[in-house]
Amino acid sequence: MITVSQLTKIYGKKVQALCGVDLEIGDGMFGMVGPNGAGKTTLMRILAGLLQPTSGKVSVLGHNVTTGRGKQAIKEVLGYLPQELGLYPDLSALEFLEYVALLKGVTGKVERKKQLDETLELVGLTQDARRRLRTYSGGMKRRVGIAQALLGRPQLLIVDEPTSGLDPEERVRVRNLLAEMSANCTVILSTHIVEDVSQSCNDLAVINLGQVLFRGSPGEIIDKARDHVWNLTTSGERPDAGLTVVSTMQLADGVQYRVVGNPLGTSKAVSVEPSLEDGYIWLMKQSRTQG
Amino acid sequence: MKTLWQIFAVARTEFRFGLRRGGPVVTTLLIGLVLGAGILIGPLSNLSTSKEDLSNFLQNPTVIQKWTEKGYTEDIFRQTFTGSMAYATVFSITLAWFGLLFTSFLLLPAATATSLPTDRKFGVAELLHSTPMSGGSYLAGKILGVGVTVALIGLIPLGLFFVVLEWAFLDAFQVGIPMDVFVFFLKFALFDGLPILGWGLTIGILAGSAFRSRRAAVIPGLLAGILSIFFWLVAFGAPAMQLDVAAYYLLQNYHSVALDTLAKVTGFPSPPLFGEGAPVIGIGQVIIMYLIIAVTLFILSGLTRLWLKWKENF
């Protein structure tokens, strides 16, 4: 269980990344969605004990991460994939993963080999494990990143943008992998790709400008957008500036726009069933309107 | 136990890097070659003269007879002749030592200053910080890893030095390096070369720890090295020669068996290496030097550890 109370983080004197965030995260997989610069990474880094908050309380698995002892305790059970993961290009995947395993305290040779074999198998890199990382594609490097996070059998897995830069097939593979992991540990998935959350999380928070805009299930966000998502067909002219265009499709007799908002007075607008992405866009739109 | 494994893991990775990337490797080889050349240049330039002298002596029946009367064989005579060469080689340290200090502190800290920034440059630092490893273990592992790289690579020029010396002795006197010369240079490498290299590489790693880019870290590494030259000379400079107290102590206690034999034959005792009335350095001063090195590096490492904790929450 993770409890965040009145959490604030100010960088320097001016940049407020988090403004009084309150959040409770239970077991299983938790999604954290928000635009770039929303404060997701800052929150993740605080939860991982990598960043000291300016004020507020954070309890992760019963440990206070604002104290040195608490941070150490969290790191003992943490698997972390940073947003900007780098790897040593001169090492092979196997060498790099063995390095991380030792740092995480997997010191027994037999256990270490077992975990290395398992994680390499899980991320599909067994065949390429001895190749230098400089020869890996972006997707393969991301998988190495996920593999290192899984080492040490973590109780808490924090993954920041794990699917960015992956092709569709790899994204599905990573999502499934994280969903499988969530059976045994708490997984916090931070992303700006709404589809990732919709496919794997029952519980999520939407963050923007350092505040929690929404906390609940994907279904609840979808409900919020109900009656605000439309298919709008025009002869070519763009919809009103007040509407957010989610998708555009060229038809034989015009252009069909999927829009979020309220296209009042337009007879050709047809209300459609919202998706999680529509719900997210509706939330963002509401947040901007309310200032 | 876990801490030791973590230190070992960081050290091993740093060692692999050291070997594959080459900065400390090239620097150590360069330092070794400069030092080796500095020591050998004098004795080797006199090699042909020594060779000629020996040959002349051996062709002189009066000399041979004199030696035979005293019960010495030609082999013993040849061995005693190596004494002056041994003496000249060992004494070359007084000329070459400053080269060791200068190149070590000018090159090595600049090369090792990139150690911590490399992790930041590759984006691995945040990942390492998320593991249970402490900043202290990280720093210790880095120093150990670079240290092992430098020490092992340092064996190459040391070996090369012995090979050249062996060839020179064999060529000139048909005998190998006298054991006392071999032991002297081993001791010198271990008790003076290693502390100098150890200081240079550690000070470089610590100086570079505050910087994010490798390029930015080189200048502080260089400055730390230049300051170290002055520090070393002021803190550990020997009273009479341009040596530190460890090198002076080793040289002062160098004992040439061949020269002893020559002295016995000629009846003239071999002169003290530094001349009559030269200051004498005791082992206590050498131990104090090592203690100052250890304590200073420990304090600087502690400050770096605090910096990492404050700046990077590590």
Image: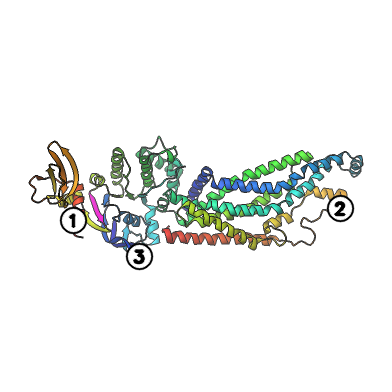
Say which residue label 2 marks.
Answer: B268
User: Which residues are the magenta region?
Assistant: A202-208
Check if mark 2 and mark 1 are on a common chain. Answer: no
Helix, strand or loop at mark 2: loop
Which is nearer the eye, B278 or B288?
B278
Question: What amino acid type is highlighted by mark number 2?
Answer: Phe
Q: Is residue B167 a member of the stretch shown in magenta?
A: no
For disc 2, the neighbor class at 10 Å (few under 14, some 14 to 19, many from 20) is: few
Left or right placement of residue B139 versus residue B229 in this view: left
Residue B92 shows in the view: yes
Secondary element type, mark 3: loop
- Disc 1 designates what residue? A286
- Who's the residue at 64% across and 51% down the image? B190
Select label 3 or label 2 by which is in front. 3
Query: With A272 as the anchor, is A288 left or right in this view?
Result: right
Where residue A215 sits, quadrant-wise, is bottom left
The three-letter code of the residue at mark 1 reads Gln
Neighbourhood count class around disc 3 (C-alpha, 10 Å): few under 14, some 14–19, many 20 upward = few
Q: Marks 2 and 1, Cα distance to the nearest angstrom?
A: 104 Å
Kind of residue at badge 3: Lys
Residue B218 — which label? Answer: none
- Contact between marks 3 and 2 (CB within 8 A): the answer is no
The residue drawn where x is 78% and y is 40% is B172
In this view of the protein, can residue B1 be seen by the observer?
no
Helix, strand or loop under label 1: helix
Q: Which residue is mark 3?
A: A13
The spot of residue A264 in percent (x, y) is 9, 51
Assess disc 1: are there few (<14), some (14-19) or many (≥20) residues with their C-alpha within 10 Å of its C-alpha. few
Rounded to the nearest whole Å, what is the CA distance between mark 3 and mark 1? 29 Å
